[in-house]
Image: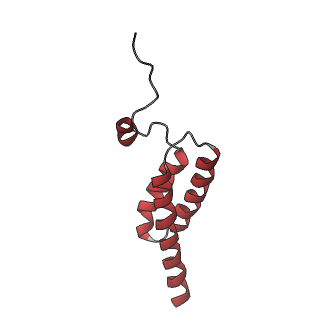
Amino acid sequence: MQPQSQGPSAVERAILPVGRSGWAIAAGYAGLLSILILPAPLALGLGIVAAIDLSRHPEKHGWGRTVFGLLAGLAGTVALVWIALQG
């Protein structure tokens, strides 16, 4: 008798986007792009949507990407506003 699978292992989740929120993945990539400043508000918005999605679906993973998207988006948005006010 084989043991029943408990779902994807931690290694599988680290390598593949198994069980992750699509919003969290999008927020993470937008957070990476927020270094270009203009996509920062998008990263912030996607991070907020991802946080709501993960709160509603606790079985999903992706909080690290979500938090990164939120923080990078917030930093880039603050920089964008600062640049706009300087001009």
Residue shown at the point (50%, 55%) measured from the top left: 66
Q: How is the model colour-coded?
A: secondary structure
As displayed, is residue 7 above or below residue 24?
above
* Image position, residue 70 (x, y; %): 52, 63
Left/right placement of residue 48 relative to residue 66 reads right
**Which residue shows up at 45% across the image and 66% down it?**
34
- Using the image as rendered, state which of residue 63 and residue 47 is in the foreground: 63
- Quarter holding the N terminus is top left
Asked whether residue 39 is in view, the answer is no
Q: Is residue 6 left or right of residue 14?
A: right
The residue lying toward the viewer, choosing from 74 and 61, is 61
Residue drawn at x 37%, y 35% as measured from the top left: 12
In the rendering, at what x and y percent does residue 40 appear? 50, 67
Q: Residue furthest bottom?
A: 86
How many numbered circles does the render carry?
Answer: 0
Q: Is residue 35 above or below residue 79?
A: above
Report which quarter residue 44 is drawn in.
bottom right
Estimate the x, y position of residue 25 in percent, counting from the top left.
Answer: 48, 49
Q: Is residue 48 in view?
A: yes
- Give the residue at the far top of this rendering: 1
Q: Is residue 28 above or below residue 78?
A: above
Residue sitting at x 43%, y 62%: 33
Residue 72 point in image, percent of width and height: 46, 66
